[in-house]
Amino acid sequence: MSIPFHARSNFQTLLRAAADGNLALMECLDAQSGSPRYVICAVARDGADYVFTPFGHLADGNPYNAYLPPDPDNPAGFVRPDAPETAP
């Protein structure tokens, strides 16, 4: 599975912001649920103003339970905990 260009570009921007010390962690509200989210933002200047560009939020709880990793045996798939085990 290929990571799309926009995601790779945003990741490079995030790395540059981190290298320059221009990252912030902001408490925001989720636009859909209204729940608090802790958002990773790049910080830039626009004249005398600061501009915060959100890149994503930190996972609530255990992040290992929030995501399914790519399946090393299937380039188009993901490892699912409910998938049946196959004997070698």
Image (cartoon, grey):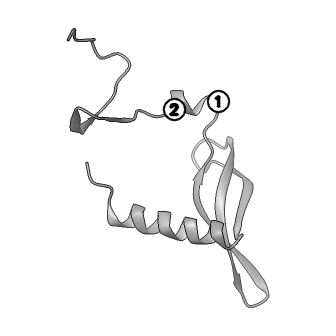
Residue 61 image label: 1
Residue 66 image label: 2
Residue lying farthest to the top in this orientation = 87
- Relative to the observer, which residue lies in front, 50 or 11? 11
Of pointers 1 and 2, the one earlier in the residue sequence: 1
- Relative to the observer, which residue lies in front, 25 or 36? 25
Report the amino acid beneath label 2: Ala
State the SS at label 1: loop
Q: Quadrant of residue 21?
A: bottom right
Q: Position of residue 3 (x, y in %)?
A: 33, 56
In the shown orientation, is residue 34 left or right of residue 68?
A: right
Q: Position of residue 69 (x, y in %)?
A: 39, 35
User: Marks 2 and 1: in contact by CB < 8 Å?
Assistant: yes
Q: Tell me the residue at 27%/11% (across/down).
A: 85
In the shown orientation, is residue 13 left or right of residue 27?
A: left
Report the amino acid beneath label 1: Gly
The image quadrant where one finds the C terminus is top left
- Relative to the observer, which residue lies in front, 64 or 33? 64
Q: Tell me the residue at 58%/72% (across/down).
A: 16
